[in-house]
Amino acid sequence: MSQQERPTAPSEPQTVANSEGEAQRYRGPDRRQRRTPRWSRYTLFGGRRRSGGRREGENEGAFVDQYSGRLLIAMLWIAAMNALDSFFTLLHLQSGGIELNPVAEAMLESGRLGFVASKSLLIIVPLVALTLHKNFPLARTGIWTAAGAYTVLVGYHLTLL
């Protein structure tokens, strides 16, 4: 029985050959058999992985430890557009406009601060979820749809001025 075929105890490192025939030490079962968990100690305090996988096709549907600057800019853009939407909504209402959205109308009953706080909370929670799921096609669609929709909405507010 060769060194590669001989079973070993978990604490005993095993030597295996890679594709170039070079010997490498084997240190236990392949930890990549499990997907990266959605929440871990690295979620908030940084880890090492920026992309989902090392090989082609492994990024799709994988969770990562760190997020790109491009994603951060997209999230900040959506949050800024949400804040501008809140500001312009209050400005238009103060000028005699009416709110046609029944959900926003209900939030406005809690006052200006309550409206801004609840509107911000209603966008921050989904943004966190979209950020965590950035390697999923539906999340990427949601991020860019939200960015585009809020941009168009703020543009509409500007035309009403």
Image (tube, rainbow, N blue to C red):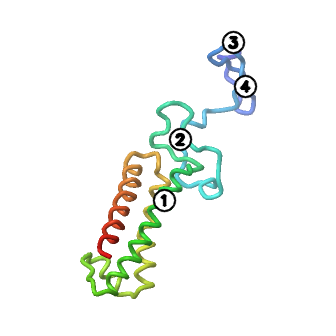
Identify which amino acid the numbered label 3 is placed on: Ser
Identify which amino acid the numbered label 4 is placed on: Arg
Q: Which of marks 2 and 3 precedes in the sequence?
A: 3
Quarter containing the C terminus: bottom left
Dot 3 falls on a residue whose secondary structure is loop
Which residue corresponds to mark 2? 52
Q: Which mark is residue 2?
A: 3
Which residue corresponds to mark 4? 25
Q: Nearer the viewer, residue 128 or 116?
A: 116
Dot 4 falls on a residue whose secondary structure is strand
Q: Nearer the viewer, residue 160 or 127?
A: 160
Foreground disc of the pair 2, 4: 2
Mark 3 near mark 2, Cβ–Cβ under 8 Å?
A: no
Measured as percent of width and height from the top left, residue 79 is found at 46, 66
Dot 2 falls on a residue whose secondary structure is loop
**Against 87, is 56 above or below?**
above
Dot 1 falls on a residue whose secondary structure is helix
Q: Which of marks 2 and 1 precedes in the sequence?
A: 2
Crowding around mark 4 (Cα neighbors within 10 Å: few <14, some 14 to 19, many 20+) is few
Whole-angstrom CA distance, mark 3 to mark 4, is: 15 Å
Identify which amino acid the numbered label 1 is placed on: Met
Crowding around mark 2 (Cα neighbors within 10 Å: few <14, some 14 to 19, many 20+) is many
